[in-house]
Amino acid sequence: MLQLFKFKGGVKPDTHKAPSLQQPIGRAPLPPRLIVPLHQSIGGIPNPLVEVGEYVLKGQCIGSADQWLSSAVHAPSSGTVVAVEERVAAHPSGLPTLSVVIETDGRDQWIERSPVDYQRLAPERVREILRDSGVVGLGGAVFPSHAKLAAAKSVAMDELVINGAECEPFMTCDDMLMRERAEEIVRGAGIFRDLLKPKRVLIGIEDNKPEAVAAMSAAVRELEADYAEFEVIAVPTRYPAGGAKQLIRVLTGKEVPASRRSPEMGVQCFNVATAYTAWRAIAHGEPVISRIVTLTGNVDAPRNWEALIGTPIRDFVALGTPQADTNSYLMGGPMMGFELPSLEAPLVKASNCIIAGSKTLFPPALPEMPCIRCGACAQVCPHELAPFEMYWFARARNFGKTQEYKIFDCIECGCCSYVCPSHIPLVQYFRFAKSEIWSREREKNKADAAKARFESRNEREERDKAEKAARLAKAAAAKKAAPVVSESTASAAPAAAAAVDSASEAQAAKQAAIAAAIERARVQREAVQPKNTDALTIAQRKEIEQIEARRAPLQGATSSTDTASQPSPKEEQ
Amino acid sequence: MSTQAKPPSAMKMAVRTAVILFLFVVAFTGLLSAAYLWTLPTIEAAAAGEKMKLIDEVLPRVGYDNDLLKDTVQLQPAAALGQNETSIAYRARKNGEPAALVLEAVAPDGYAGKIRLLIAFAADGAVLGVRVTQHKETPGLGDYVEPQKDKNKEHPWITQFDGLNPGRIDAREWKVKKDGGRFDSVAGATVTPRAVIKAVRKAALYVEENRQQLFAPARGEAK
Amino acid sequence: MTREEFRQIAANGVWRQNTSIVQILGLCPLLAVTTNLVNGAMLSLATILVMAISGAAVASLRYLIPHEIRIPVFILIVAALVTVVDLLFNANLHQLYLVLGIFIPLIVTNCIVLARVEAYANKNPPLQSAADGIFMGVGMLWTLSLLGGLRELIGRGTLFSGIDMVFPGLHPLQILPADYPGLLLAMLPPGAFILLGCLIAWKNWIESRAAARSRRRPPEPATAAGCH
Amino acid sequence: MTHYLFIIVGAVLVNNVVLVRILGLCPFMGVSKKVETAFGMGSATTFVLTVATGASYVIDHFLLMPFGLEYLRTLSFIVTIAAIVQLTEMVIQKTSPVLHQVLGIYLPLITTNCAVLGVPLLNVANQYNFVESLLFGAGSAIGFSLVLVLFAGIRERVEGADVPVHFRGVAIAMVTAGLMSLAFMGFAGLDKYQ
Amino acid sequence: MLTAILIMALGAIVLGSALGYASIKFKVEGNPLVEKIEAILPQTQCGQCGYPGCKPYAEAIAEGEAEINLCPPGGQEGVRKLADLLGREVKPLDAEEKPKQVAIIDEQTCIGCTLCIQACPVDAIVGAAKQMHTIVGALCTGCELCLPPCPVECISMARITENIDSWKWKYPVIEIKQLKRVA
Amino acid sequence: MNFSTPPYLAQNVSVQRVMLQVLAALLPGIAAYVWLLGPAVLVQLVVASACALAAEAAMLRLLGKPLALYLGDGSALVTAWLIALAFPPLAPWWLIVVGVLFAIVIAKHLYGGLGQNPFNPAMIAFAVAIVSFPALMSQWPPVDTNAGFVDQLALIFGLAPRIDAMSGATPLDALKTALKLGEGSVSVAKIVADTSTYGQLAGRGWEWVAAAYLLGGLWLWQRKVISAHAPFAFIGGIALFAGALWLWNPAQFANPLFHLFSGGTMLGAFFIVTDPVSGCTTPKGKLIFGFAAGVLAYLIRVFGGYPDGVAFAVLLLNICVPLIDLYTQPPIFGMKGKP
Ligand SMILES: Cc1cc2nc3c(=O)[nH]c(=O)nc-3n(C[C@H](O)[C@H](O)[C@H](O)COP(=O)(O)O)c2cc1C
Ligand SMILES: Cc1cc2nc3c(=O)[nH]c(=O)nc-3n(C[C@H](O)[C@H](O)[C@H](O)COP(=O)(O)O)c2cc1C
Ligand SMILES: Cc1cc2nc3c(=O)[nH]c(=O)nc-3n(C[C@H](O)[C@H](O)[C@H](O)COP(=O)(O)O)c2cc1C
Ligand SMILES: Cc1cc2nc3c(=O)[nH]c(=O)nc-3n(C[C@H](O)[C@H](O)[C@H](O)CO)c2cc1C
Ligand code: SF4
Ligand code: SF4
Ligand code: SF4
Ligand code: SF4
Ligand code: FES
């Protein structure tokens, strides 16, 4: 048996897993409308490939990966695209994001699927297929999996860790998946193994899921021949044993610091569901259009459902019949998840669990008291940070100090908040500090770029001025018909000679043009202004669109980083 | 702003600043020295007055007629006085006859370090007066040996020594009441008085021992 | 010097740029000698003298002083004046001289003196500079006296102790009952720091009240720490 | 030997320049907002103060005392110190930009640090010899730097605290200094064996 | 008295010449402080501080001539950083804090006069003479300098609104009582 | 809006519970104290608690903080009880009031209240009192003169004159004075044998009070309210220095057990150096804090100007806490053995 290691800290909340384990995975009914956000993974935002009114087939790509670090998005069922617009997202902000809305036709008609024998393909090609099938980490981070499948060049890959720990309370989607589809998970892990070529493949499962351990062990045993280096290991139950770094630590003894990526230390980690979807994508040609979602909490029928991505959460939770005193819905587990701002938001690839909450299940937060520096938070922090110090400085908005205390090593697991006797929402403070730091970083970069442009502009102006002076001097000299041009002016503006032209004349012409233009514009404005902006004619709209279209490439050409700050045309008026 | 002007060479600059500084220094040192010379006599008088004021507290003017600041004797360091440097004793005379002696003693074992005392002795060795001139005893606790700080304004603690002659009083009595002696003390702070009492007694015995030299009429060095 | 200018200088010195509780300079004498009111006041008077004369002197000589050696020259002027004052104290107020100890010579390094010389006298005419020195000193005078009075009162229950060193005929006042035990801490360095802290907070309070009244909009707290 | 030890302990802790003797307060309050800067100020002051005590001793014993010019002490000490500071600053700025980064902005402030003049004057009052003077100077400077850095540590922390509005900033720093000074009273008596 | 003057004069000559010599020998140009200050300023180059650009303002601060609370785009946060750097007390900003903005050109009205291009300090406007101009949103710092020169007033400022990528987690708890107190 | 944030689960812990456990742990010590010196200390506890709650309430009102929430947290009571236990039991009532006011108003609320004070409020109270009123603070009733409760009340409330008989010194103080007066001619053994002040280990009966504090402290440790680092480092610091000097010269220095069971050692070790707010937070920091405080406490009580050094030692270490914490941050996950 493998020697297990320990990670420091961690907590043991009640698991509440049993209720949703009573039933096998069900297939959620097809909803009348699917709302598919284009941005469902880390990385570039996929470009929409469909227009309103287009008919799409199940599995048809509707958003193509934008860059290498990006992942495609597919239609979960067949039907008509009724809108490509901003829809509220399953995101704590409750802000909208560009989504494709499909009215399903109930036929659920697949596009043509093309399974491949990946062992014959070049690894590059396999990764491309995974990207174009929208395979992303289903453990929660939705990081494009193909990007994680390139081994570091300098370090040999020792271990591939398959994460079946599922340490969050309430959540059972991975557990059920392992119980019911163990073989496909193992085969999917086999793809990862073949791409990464590790010495061992370690499947870690918390020891409170004996059925899953048994099922996975059986699957590995059955497939023995090809999967000899696979090992299924029960790890002690302690939140957050499922955090990639914690699981890696427990299984291999390696500690991956925040500043490094795990492949650099010869190990990589994937969630079991990710492995499953990878197998489906390669061996069946099925892109990621559905996932297992646990529906539990304050509902009459807790259960795991295989639901289509894009299913509105309102439709989804109805499957479990929430009880009357339900007052909130969480997406994700109770430790790391968030309260859904709206039930109109759809399920996405990251939605592993929906919990209906009530006052008794999740009592309202007790009032925040001051930190008494008791150190309990530091004792349970799996990353061995000093949460109370980060809190102290985050609260005072001293962000430099929070970084000194390594706020970016915090994985936001919530253990610290869980044990804090002062009921401080520590994780919130950390999130607040992190997003402030990021935003300042953005602003700083912008300021630096602005400064550079300002300086180059100043330089250019200086040069122009010098040139102009030279030109004028030359012109004056010419007028005087002086036979000799002074040495220095000649060298200063050698090219200007061709454009000798009375400067004042040009000035006058320009002035007149401007005056005319001003007049024109005044008339124009007077004509336009009284009109109400929302009563625009189709023609006018078209015109605006044309202008927009003209601007778009311009923007693309010049804007480098921040497309976000470009206001949409609506705001313009 | 003469940035356009060529900066002068280092040597030239050195000379220039030196000269200017020189002029300023001469002017202001002159001013200062003048003030010093002008105030010098007053300062000396003030210092002497201060000294006399202190001495007056332990030795009333009526008892002598000489200028005792001029009639001094230098004492070598002596353990009995708690001194490890030379110190000065002032001699009071009445009609040329030795009348009293004022000297400094140090009680090394106060609660918080040394306690400096000024003691006046009569020619017969009796203590005429004691004053604490410097100490670091705890304010509000041990500092009642200083008459200004003593709550008992009528008979400050330190006046208990007046008129006593340790040569005639038994050593056992030369202690605080708590230890079976004759001196009062404030409860809770007996370290300080014990130290002062011991120091006064030692000084008295020293005077007794060296009376010859100390009261000798001629100007000479004692011991 | 116009009236308005004069008023400005006075207001700056006495309150707006008060050295002790606004500029937080010249702290050592402020805290060290204020064990009673008389000490504080007398040292302030000495400082006023030095500041007025040095201000005037530097302002008159400012064109003669090269930039490179301006600091040594300023210090020279101030030090010479301080020593004169020191000698005067020694001669005429000998007892007080002994009490104030090294804090008279330390007027030289009292940051205010040099700061005013450098920041004001070096750029302004003599009359204004002298006025500036005097009013800066007046600002110091009232703060030192206030602090000294407070410390004395809390620590001992008296006021004006040591007045006999200046005016031999006068006597200290016993304000609190004679059996008041006296919070000795107030007379010791910790008490000085804490009371000065409270004094500064008091000034902040007055200013924020005045600001609130005049603007009906509260100012930001002095330091932007804490939560909003 | 123990005598020297007691001088140092006395100067650093028992009679700490800042908290007990109340000298050098302006930089103590002014340059203690951050530990880093406090450290720079401390280093600069330590250097200058040690040099200043040495120089003052030499001036006092070889220029002033032989001619009975004790009344020129204040004047000559401070002018010398000012010059030393300025020279040091210029030399450091040219020769070691790194060091200047650390100490540069503090050096000019040192001239107006009472401790720099106060310690040589105390040396004279205590009648210390050359070695004792140097030790006392260095000890005082170390004591200054020590409390400065510790104070900066506390201030950094207190800046995040919910201090009542009117006490924010300097006022609470004063109170903190007061409580530090109270704590330092605990050392009282530890040097009395000298 | 004479000895006094002599001895002091001796000292004066020594120190004076040393200082004078050093002041030339060890002369240093430039001021690293200015760079540090400038790094804090937002580089909007708007001139609202009363100086022609961020750098002149930085120089003025370093010289001790300018207050640190004059830059509105930097906001209170900028004041705080400057105070930190310079060891000065934080002061309230000498203006209202404005929300972040970008300039938008109404393309229908624009006559292509190029005046705004000349005004924009950070080259955020593109376009050629007599053609339509457009503002590159990502580059615009919102300094409003292009508004006055436009002869046809076709430029307006728009607030930047939050989207899902620029969204920030909010400060967790608002201690209401506390707030009231500060106010 | 109900601003709810993850995690949505929480352990059943609160500041109030922590503080109540600390108060509970003090009870055995209080019982032993009452048994030894009579019920006077109970009066002091009541005075201190009432004053602390009143001051806390006033400050909370003044600063506009929610009264109900903070007044019930129990931290003011912990401070008040520690003050009452550290002051002489027959000290006049106003002395304790002054101490408590200093602790709550200046040491605690000027820094923003609970959790934000850099100095230990109770020890500030003690230091202020002993510096300002050394005489009152060094008068402890001898263990034997068990005056009646009424007499004790009369003394506390100033209705009876303070008589010398009521003012002894603690064993530590007495020993120090005796050694000082003896000037090396008397040995510790002789002094201890001479008077009735000294009991088996430390002062007569005082060791029982210390043992009861120890008991309470161990219970706190077992309940995980405090960690063992600081207390044991503190005890170790005192024991090490006391032991070394005792071995070197047993005539002049009392044995380590005497030091461990007299004065504020045990109260300090388990209730004062463990104060989470003003103490170090890292494990290594706690060790340094405890050890250095122990050493300083020993040096001050043996060589310094005050009868016991725990308060000053703790305050001096409070000054160093931010820097100790800064430089003893343990390496975080993945950074072990790396800079
Ligand atoms: C900006 C960024 C770049 C990353 N690049 C890679 C990469 O090149 N290769 C890789 O295997 N993982 C990469 N990762 C993935 C992380 O190392 C980590 O495995 C992944 O985010 C899973 O996170 P989780 O453990 O929180 O789910 C990257 C992550 C981020 C945020
Ligand atoms: C605190 C925490 C707990 C996590 N728990 C789990 C878990 O129980 N199961 C899981 O598969 N991933 C979990 N993750 C995500 C993993 O860190 C990691 O992203 C994932 O295993 C990588 O696989 P993927 O890229 O296939 O998602 C957790 C992450 C964090 C930060
Ligand atoms: C802080 C403090 C300061 C003290 N200062 C003095 C002092 O200055 N002088 C003194 O005699 N006793 C002082 N004592 C008291 C001594 O420690 C000792 O208890 C006392 O002198 C013994 O006196 P007794 O013999 O009257 O009981 C002080 C005590 C304390 C706690
Ligand atoms: C283990 C423990 C020890 C404590 N020790 C003290 C103490 O020594 N002094 C004190 O004033 N408060 C103490 N408290 C109470 C509380 O932390 C204190 O009031 C805060 O310092 C006030 O902010 C203690 C609390 C706990 C939990
Ligand atoms: S658990 Fe809470 S109270 Fe304790 S140190 Fe951490 S943040 Fe502070
Ligand atoms: S949320 Fe961050 S700080 Fe808190 S326990 Fe988890 S990793 Fe540590
Ligand atoms: S106000 Fe600010 S952004 Fe505008 S020019 Fe001045 S420093 Fe730059
Ligand atoms: S486009 Fe206008 S507002 Fe934007 S940066 Fe240029 S001048 Fe400023
Ligand atoms: S007055 Fe002493 S340093 Fe300023």
Image: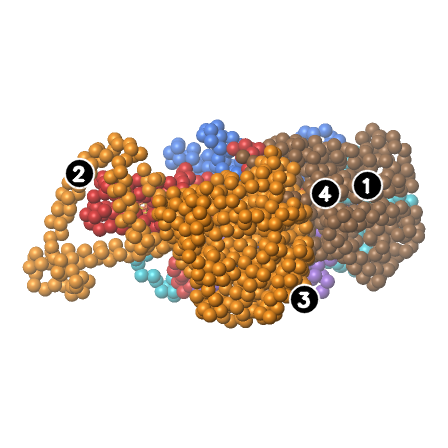
Chain colours: A orange, B cyan, C blue, D purple, E red, F brown
Q: Secondary structure at mark 4?
A: helix
Residue at 11% from the left image edge and 53% from the top image edge: A502
Ligand 4 near label 4 (Cβ, under 8 Å)?
yes
Marks 2 and 3 belong to one chain = yes
State which mark lies toward you, 3 or 1: 3
Q: Could you tell which of marks 1 and 4 lies nearer the N-terminus? A: 4
Q: How far across and down, in percent of the image, does residue D33 sit?
A: 55, 49
Give the amino acid type for the residue marked by disc 4 in the picture: Val
Q: Nearer the viewer, mark 1 or mark 4?
A: 4
Please state the horizontal and vertical placement of residue A567, each as a whole percent of the image: 36, 44
Q: CA distance from mark 1 to mark 4?
A: 15 Å
| Chain assignment, label 1 | F
Q: For the residues marked 2 and 3, what is the alpha-carbon distance in whole angstroms?
A: 83 Å
Residue positioned 77% across, 50% down in the render:
F221
Label 2 or label 1, whichever lies nearer to me, is 2
F40 lies left or right of C40: right
Residue A520 got which mark?
2
Q: Are marks 3 and 1 on the same chain?
A: no
Q: Label 1 crowding class (10 Å Cα cut-off): few <14, some 14-19, many 20+? A: some
Question: Where is residue E44 shown, x and y percent of the image?
Answer: 36, 48
Q: Which residue is mark 3?
A: A2
Work out how far the residue at label 3 is from the one at label 4, CA to CA, in angstroms.
41 Å
Residue named by callout 1: F27
Closer to the N terminus: mark 2 or mark 3? 3
The mark lying in front, picked from 2 and 3, is 3
**Label 4: how many Cα within 10 Å (few below 14, some 14–19, many 20+):** many
Q: How many numbered marks appear? A: 4
Query: What separation in Å lies between label 3 and label 1 (alpha carbons)?
Result: 50 Å
Disc 4 to disc 2: CB gap under 8 Å: no
Gap between marks 2 and 1, in whole Å?
92 Å
